[in-house]
Image (tube, helix red, strand yellow):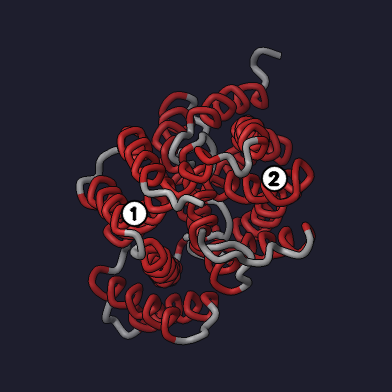
Amino acid sequence: MTSRTPPPPTLSALALAFARISVASFGGGVSAWMMRELVHRRRWLTNEAFLADLAMAQALPGVNVVNLPLWIGYRLFGGLGALVCALAVIVPSAAVLAVLAVLVIPLQRFPQTGLAFAGAAAAAIGLSLATGFRAAQGVMARPAAAAVMGATFVAVGLLKLPMVPVLLVLAPASIALAHRGRPRA
Amino acid sequence: MRDSPLLALAAVFVPLSLLSVGGGQAVLADVHRQVVTDHHWLSEAQFLTDYLLSRMSPGPNSMIVMLIGHQVAGPLGAVVAVVGMFLPSSLLVYAVAHVWTRHAGAVWRVSVERGLAPIAAGLILATTLTLMQSMGGGWIAWVLAIAVAVGLLLFRLHPLLLIAAGAAAFLGLGLAGAM
C-alpha cells in the first residue's frame, strides 16, 4: 500500500478548505486547486486516493468540482459530510459570481477587461499544469499506471477523442492491470 | 402554469444535470442551443458574456446557469437553475458514494481505485493541454502559463498572487501596445 496520511481532523476543517477554494479559484482549474490544497499542502489525502476520487467524480454525471467535494465528504464524514462539502463549494462561488456580474458587466465595454481576463486565465492554467505535473510524478512509480496515464493523455488531449468512450475502454483495462499487479499479503 | 418560466428553466437544466457525464463542459453546447436558439432567452452576446464571467469567476464554471436563470426569471430563476443543474446529479453521486463506501476495503475496490488514479492524472494533463490550446493571447499566454507552473513547482507561492500578476501583465502589455 501507499503511505498513509492523517485524514482531515474535522468536517468543518475540510468544508472550510473547500469554501476557501470556491472563492479563491479565479480563472478556473478548480480541481487543481483542490488537489494542491488537500494533497500537497495539507497532506490529508494521498496522491492516489485523491486521483481515484477525482476519477469517480469525472466518470459520474454532474459537475466534476461539485461531485468531488461531495464524494470526498461522504467518504470521510458520511451523508452530512457530502452535503456540507458540496454546499461549501456551491454557495460561496454563487455569491462571488453574483457580485462579479454586477461589477464586471459594465466594464465589458473596455477591451482592457478582456485582456485582464485572458491574463488571469493563462496564469490559472499554469496552476493546472503544475498540478498535472505533480499528479503524473506520483503515478510514474508504476510502469503499468504510467502507460495508462500516457494513453489517456494521448487519446483525450492529443487526439481529442470524446472522454466517455475513452473511459469505457481504458478504465476496465487499467483496473484489470491494477488487479493483476496488486500487492498481496 | 404551463408557461411558467421557472418550470421551463427546470425542464432545461434537470435533464442536462443527469446527462452531464464528463462534467459541466459536456452539456454547455446544449445549454447554448436551448437557451439562445430554441427559447431565445438570451442573445448570443449575452450568452458569451455570461460564459466568460463564469469561467473567470472562482468555483464551478457551470455556475453560468445561475446567470442564465437570473436573466430569465429574476432571483428565483437563479435559484431554480442552480438547484436544477446541481441537485439531480448530486443525488445520483450520493447514492453511488453510499454503495461504494459499504464495500470499503474490498479487494476489487482497491483495484478499481488503483486503476482509476492514472486515468485521472492523464485527464488532468489532457484538460490542461486543451485549455492551453484555447487560451487567448497567443504565445505570450503559453509563456505565462508555463512560467506560473514552474513558479508554483519551485517556490511556495500562492496561486492567487500569480493569477493577479497574470492579469496585470496582460493589462500592462495591452496598454503598452504589445498585445
Residue A112 sits in quarter: bottom left
Q: Is residue A107 visible?
A: no
Q: How many marks?
A: 2
Q: Are marks 1 and 2 on the same chain?
A: yes
Residue A40 sits in quarter: bottom right
User: Which residue bears the numbered disc 2?
Assistant: A74
When the figure is inspected, residue B150 is found, relative to residue B69, above or below; the finding is: below
Q: Which mark is residue A145?
A: 1
Q: Position of residue B114 (x, y in %)?
A: 45, 49
Question: What is the chain letter for disc 2?
Answer: A
Most extreme residue toward the top is B2
Q: Report the amino acid beneath label 1.
A: Ala
Question: What is the chain letter for disc 1?
Answer: A
Q: Position of residue A77 (x, y in %)?
A: 75, 49
Q: Report the amino acid beneath label 2.
A: Tyr
Q: Is residue B125 left or right of residue B81?
A: left
Q: Position of residue A116 (x, y in %)?
A: 44, 71
User: Helix, strand or loop at disc 1?
Assistant: helix
Nearer to us: label 1 or label 2: 1
